């Protein structure tokens, strides 16, 4: 089912896909044609010599040369065009998936980054993206080739067709399908093991200190070795099956060739075909089998693709976010919670019940309370990420449910608990928020969080690439960077979730003092003392146990 | 294979030229040849699969061992290592199984075929032999150009591709910062740029395949035409001509395969470069490291040799070569890991009979692998059975002192002396460095500054220190650590899930759980590195109480690195460390 949806994806770029397919088909035809013509030419020459017939030498030899050049050129075109089509499909696919993900509700969006899934997602998406190139194209080409070859053969003899079809179907469909059925559970287990192994290894790397001092390293390594062993056993089985499929393919091709010589030979002896045609048919059939080679591999991969497709589709199925139509006029003066209740999905007990309070843009607030008392969820609700399960939140008197999210987020910004920024140059991160951001403004935001000297020291300064495949940031630096980005948006309300986590206390104090004394409308979740005295009001969330 | 074609050619010639009946015996022979080839290929597939299995497994084992050797402070260890390992172990299989094998085939198979063809038609053999060296030449030329392009653009391409996945995992951020439409545009733009840049590389990369294809095709076409004319005009044997024609594509096959598998080599080399740092010699254990690196290299060489010994058509020169390589390499790693265990001292085999009286640091200097100096000529004494608090400004070496005690850092000068009292009252002195690793590990338990909790339940995380601990023991440890109240906040108790890097619980909770975890490992010396950082005042008080209770039993020696007054107040002995 999921695979079927995948096929509909190709429809989006059907022109490129068809072009790639056409090129691939033509090059295969040229390749088979070359071998067949060469065989025909050689045999006809042999027969002509033996029986003393005069032959037109130049047309066939020119044809061979033409086919040779065509084949070379078409192969190149085939590769280029099919890759082009693949990339076009990838482009469409990513856009669609992303647009869909953007519309999802908060918790469904969070699914995209749960630890287990995140590692898998990239592999899944890549697997799907290559399905056209690796699976669809070879299968389609082989099918079209079989059809054409079948038509040509049937014009000579039905016997030939039957032999050809039996060998072709056996090698191209039956055997790979059987093997793929056999290998499906193993390859599924291998994929899981691979992810598990990577997961455990990265776990061990991050926790190496703890593991070493707790004397648990040898025990953990033992389990890693075990995993590695199982994984390689699984891979052994799969590569054995793959080798079997290839060997069977070759066997089929050779047997088919032998049968063809026998069958076409007897036809020749009966005088129904010429000598040249006999050899042309035999070698042509042999050459057809070459196109089956990728088909076997494609079918072996099919279960994995199917699984990936299902996972990605499950992920992008979810409730979509609802939003209203109204927008905020002017400054956001107050956020008023009226009997607010929050319940986490899957929980019976409400996290927060009957919470009423008015936050004003002219004051700074601190939210404290024991862990698990709902501080972070309250911030998420205030910033419109999650909808309240009971009560209302009024922004300047307008119910949050009737408000456009874009308009709310122009007036309010949230600095998440886990430092979040997307890789890129420092400048690009800031200009994404304000396209006309001047260097001085960026600099002052970075100076508030004491990151300017670090950025300045990087090769390239503001244009240095941070994140994956670039300069790495420590946890504290990442947190300060995300703080700087939130500050830079200069909204009426600034919601900070544990801004000091991972910073050293002295630095935290300095940074918070700078922020809290120069602006108002800050709502800060914290469990520490630092900065509390700078807030106008301190709210303590209590849990009833 | 050649035999098969020979039979086929003979049969065809008999039928077509001599107009005899279908020669069943020859066709049967051809079919038999096909079956024989099938069997040989099966054997080859089996050997290939087991080779790749072994090389993959072995490689991972070596990486695990190197990781353990390098120690937690090594700059070579980065979180990216996990994915590089995965990438490498995946890349190494096609490298050995496909690339190296094809390479070997390229060396042998065309030569064998050329030899056969030479007997049939010297002229064709000459043509093929002349074309053959041109192929690698063009490939190398184009390959160089492609690589130059590659290096320049590869990073860019990786970034563009990665950025998409990053955007997917930052959806709430994009939503809250009003970046939706911008990101959508950015994803569109980046995917397009990614496509264009990758296609640029492919234009050139496919050229090398084109060159191969061209020569292969031209070779076949040329053979067909010259043979055709030879047969027609000079009466050259048709049987031999057909044989040559059938062999010609086979002649170029390994070369074409080589072109296909060339990227396997590139990929494997790139992946190997990513983990190269790991096998760089660690500063304080150069000898063990080098021999291990040698073992790794040797193992790789041997497996490579084994891979090459599998002759293409299935005739095996040394079928068992793969397994000796495997055994030898594992033997190497075993000898490396067991090397230090030999120095066991029988007289102190069981530390349980001894009580720790004092730990003396004598002129200790210690340096981190990245060159940072942690402690310089520090001398002080820690009292056994007491609460010792190390104080001083940050960077003065508090953590370093703990790391030295835990054996995570070897001091570059000076020594740490232990004073032990036997239950019989006998007293003895012992240098820390003389302890066997087992004894040393039993001596201490440690709560690091940033305790790490992995993805899993709280129970599984606590059990790291004591894999067989029952729930009662876990609860006891949590109570001793003063964490029972924190535990009551977690609705699922021990079954609560903790995300990577203690996501889902606060830093304060994590620290208390880490203390409980450390207490599960029975040891006379409890080391705590800034245990109250990110605890609120309430929890800090609880922690202080718990630590006091632990010390009151008199069994434990506590060493705490602290800078908050609450904990410093606990000190029965305060050691002020000056700045380095």
Image (spheres, coloured by chain):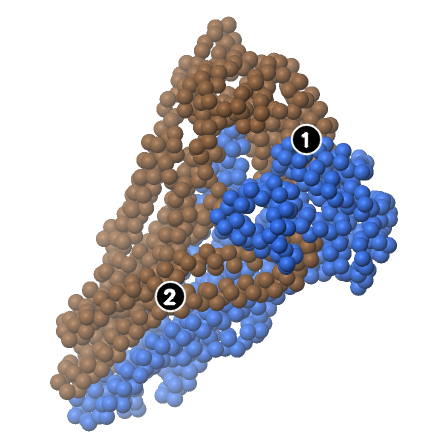
**SS at mark 1 in the image:** loop
> Where is residue A349 drawn, in percent x and y?
79, 44
Q: Identify the residue at the far left of this view.
A: B234
Chain coloured blue in this rendering: A
Foreground residue among B132 and A296: B132
Q: Residue A239 bears which disc, if any?
A: none
Q: Residues within 10 Å of mark 1 (few under 14, many from 20)?
A: many
State the image quarter where residue B5 is shown.
bottom left
Q: Position of residue B13 (x, y in %)?
A: 20, 81
Which residue corresponds to mark 2? Answer: B205
- Which residue does the image show at 30% across and 86% down from the upper left? A63
| Residue beneath the point at 52% across and 49% down | A461
Q: Secondary structure at mark 2?
A: helix
Looking at the image, the residue that sits furthest to the top is B425
Give the letter of the brown chain: B
- What's the distance in space between the residues labelled 2 and 1, CA to CA? 57 Å
Using residue B543 as the reference point, say whether residue A239 is left or right of it: left
Label 2 environment density (alpha carbons within 10 Å; few <14, some 14–19, many ≥20): many
Which residue lies under the disc numbered 1?
A: B535
Residue B33 appears in the rendering: no
Q: Position of residue B69 (x, y in %)?
A: 42, 34
């Amino acid at each position: 089912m999921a695979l079927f949806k995948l096929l509909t994806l190709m429809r989006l770029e059907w022109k490129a896909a068809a072009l790639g397919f056409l090129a691939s088909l033509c090059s295969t035809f040229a390749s088979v044609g070359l071998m067949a013509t060469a065989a025909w030419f050689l045999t006809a020459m042999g027969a002509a010599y033996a029986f003393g017939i005069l032959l037109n030498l130049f047309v066939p030899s020119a044809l061979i040369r033409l086919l040779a050049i065509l084949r070379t050129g078409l192969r190149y075109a085939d590769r280029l065009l099919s890759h082009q089509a693949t990339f076009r499909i990838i482009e469409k696919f990513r856009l669609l998936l992303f647009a869909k993900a953007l519309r999802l509700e908060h918790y469904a969006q969070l699914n995209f980054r749960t630890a287990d899934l995140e590692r898998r997602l990239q592999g899944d998406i890549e697997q799907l993206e290559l399905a056209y190139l690796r699976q669809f194209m070879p299968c389609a080409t082989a099918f079209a080739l079989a059809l054409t070859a079948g038509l040509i053969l049937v014009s000579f003899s039905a016997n030939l067709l039957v032999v050809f079809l039996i060998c072709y179907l056996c090698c191209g469909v039956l055997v790979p399908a059987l093997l793929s059925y056999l290998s499906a559970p193993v390859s599924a287990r291998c994929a899981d093991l691979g992810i598990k192994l990577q997961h455990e290894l990265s776990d061990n790397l991050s926790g190496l200190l703890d593991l070493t001092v707790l004397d648990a390293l040898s025990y953990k390594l033992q389990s890693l070795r075990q995993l590695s062993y199982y994984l390689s056993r699984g891979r052994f089985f799969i590569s054995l099956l793959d080798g079997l499929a290839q060997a069977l393919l070759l066997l089929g091709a050779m047997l088919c060739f032998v049968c063809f010589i026998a069958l076409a030979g007897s036809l020749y002896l009966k005088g129904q075909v010429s000598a040249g045609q006999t050899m042309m048919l035999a070698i042509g059939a042999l050459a057809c089998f070459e196109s089956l080679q990728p088909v076997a591999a494609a079918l072996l991969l099919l279960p994995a693709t199917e699984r990936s497709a299902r996972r990605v589709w499950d992920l992008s199925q979810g409730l979509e976010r609802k939003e209203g139509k109204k927008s905020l006029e002017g400054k956001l003066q107050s956020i008023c919670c009226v009997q607010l209740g929050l319940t986490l999905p899957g929980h019976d007990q409400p996290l927060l019940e009957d919470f009423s309070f008015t936050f004003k843009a002219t004051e700074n607030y601190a939210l404290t309370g024991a862990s698990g008392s709902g501080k972070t969820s309250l911030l998420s609700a205030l910033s419109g990420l999650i909808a309240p399960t009971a009560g209302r939140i009024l922004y300047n008197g307008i119910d949050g449910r009737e408000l456009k999210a874009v308009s709310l987020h122009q007036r309010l910004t949230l600095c998440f608990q886990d430092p979040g920024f997307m890789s890129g140059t420092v400048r690009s991160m800031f200009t994404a928020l304000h396209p006309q951001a001047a260097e001085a403004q960026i600099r002052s935001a970075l100076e508030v969080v004491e990151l300017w000297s670090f950025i300045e020291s990087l090769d390239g300064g503001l244009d240095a690439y941070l994140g994956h495949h670039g300069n790495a940031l420590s946890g504290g630096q990442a947190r300060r960077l995300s703080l700087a980005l939130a500050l830079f948006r200069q909204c009426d309300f600034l919601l900070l979730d544990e801004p000091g986590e991972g910073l050293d206390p002295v630095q935290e104090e300095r940074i918070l003092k700078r922020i809290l004394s120069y602006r108002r409308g800050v709502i800060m979740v914290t469990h520490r003392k630092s900065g509390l005295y700078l807030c106008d009001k301190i709210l303590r969330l209590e849990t009833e146990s | 294979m050649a035999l098969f074609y020979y039979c086929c050619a003979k049969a065809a010639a008999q039928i077509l030229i001599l107009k005899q009946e279908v020669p069943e015996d020859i066709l049967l022979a051809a079919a038999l040849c096909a079956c024989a080839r099938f069997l040989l290929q099966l054997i080859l597939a089996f050997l290939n699969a087991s080779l790749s299995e072994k090389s993959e497994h072995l490689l991972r084992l070596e990486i695990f061992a190197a990781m353990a050797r390098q120690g937690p402070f090594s700059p070579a260890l980065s979180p990216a290592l996990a994915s590089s390992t995965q990438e490498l172990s995946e890349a190494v299989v096609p490298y050995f199984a496909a690339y190296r094998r094809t390479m070997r085939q390229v060396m042998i198979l065309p030569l064998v075929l050329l030899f056969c063809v030479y007997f049939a038609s010297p002229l064709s053999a000459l043509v093929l032999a002349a074309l053959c060296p041109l192929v690698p030449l063009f490939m190398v030329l184009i390959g160089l150009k492609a690589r130059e392009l590659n290096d320049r653009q590869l990073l860019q391409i990786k970034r563009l591709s990665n950025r998409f996945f990053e955007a997917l995992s930052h959806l709430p951020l994009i939503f809250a910062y009003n970046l939706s439409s911008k990101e959508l545009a950015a994803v569109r733009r980046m995917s397009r740029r990614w496509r264009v840049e990758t296609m640029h590389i492919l234009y050139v990369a496919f050229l090398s395949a084109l060159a191969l294809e061209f020569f292969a095709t031209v070779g076949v076409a040329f053979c067909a035409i010259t043979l055709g004319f030879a047969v027609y005009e000079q009466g050259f044997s048709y049987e031999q001509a057909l044989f040559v024609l059938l062999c010609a594509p086979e002649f170029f096959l390994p070369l074409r395969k080589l072109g296909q598998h060339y990227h396997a080599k590139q990929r494997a080399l790139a992946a190997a470069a990513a983990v190269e740092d790991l096998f760089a010699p660690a500063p304080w254990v150069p000898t063990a490291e080098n021999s291990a690196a040698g073992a790794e290299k040797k193992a790789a060489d041997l497996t490579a040799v084994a891979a090459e010994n599998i002759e293409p058509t299935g005739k095996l020169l040394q079928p068992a070569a793969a397994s000796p390589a495997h055994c030898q390499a594992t033997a190497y790693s075993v000898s490396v890991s067991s090397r230090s265990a030999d120095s066991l001292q029988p007289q102190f085999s069981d530390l349980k009979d001894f009580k720790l009286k004092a730990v003396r640091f004598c002129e200790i200097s210690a340096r981190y692998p990245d060159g940072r100096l942690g402690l310089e000529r520090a001398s002080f004494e820690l009292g056994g059975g007491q609460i010792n608090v190390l104080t001083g400004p940050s960077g003065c070496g508090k953590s370093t002192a703990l790391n030295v005690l835990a054996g995570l850092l070897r001091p570059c000068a000076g020594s740490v002396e232990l004073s032990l009292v036997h239950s019989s009252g006998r007293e003895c002195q012992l240098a820390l460095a003389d302890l066997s690793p087992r004894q040393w590990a039993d001596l201490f338990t440690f709560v690091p500054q940033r305790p790490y909790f992995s993805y899993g339940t709280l129970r599984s995380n606590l059990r790291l220190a004591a894999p067989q601990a029952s729930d009662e023991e876990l609860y006891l440890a949590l109570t001793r650590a003063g964490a029972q109240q924190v535990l009551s906040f977690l609705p699922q108790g021990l079954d609560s899930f903790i995300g990577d890097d203690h996501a889902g619980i606060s830093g304060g909770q994590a620290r208390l759980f880490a203390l409980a975890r450390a207490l599960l490992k029975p040891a006379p010396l409890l080391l705590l590195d800034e245990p109250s950082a990110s605890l609120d005042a309430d929890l800090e008080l609880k922690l202080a109480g718990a630590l006091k209770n632990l010390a009151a039993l008199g069994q434990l020696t506590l060493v705490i690195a602290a800078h908050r007054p609450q904990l410093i107040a606990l000190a029965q002995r305060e050691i002020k460390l000056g700045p380095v």
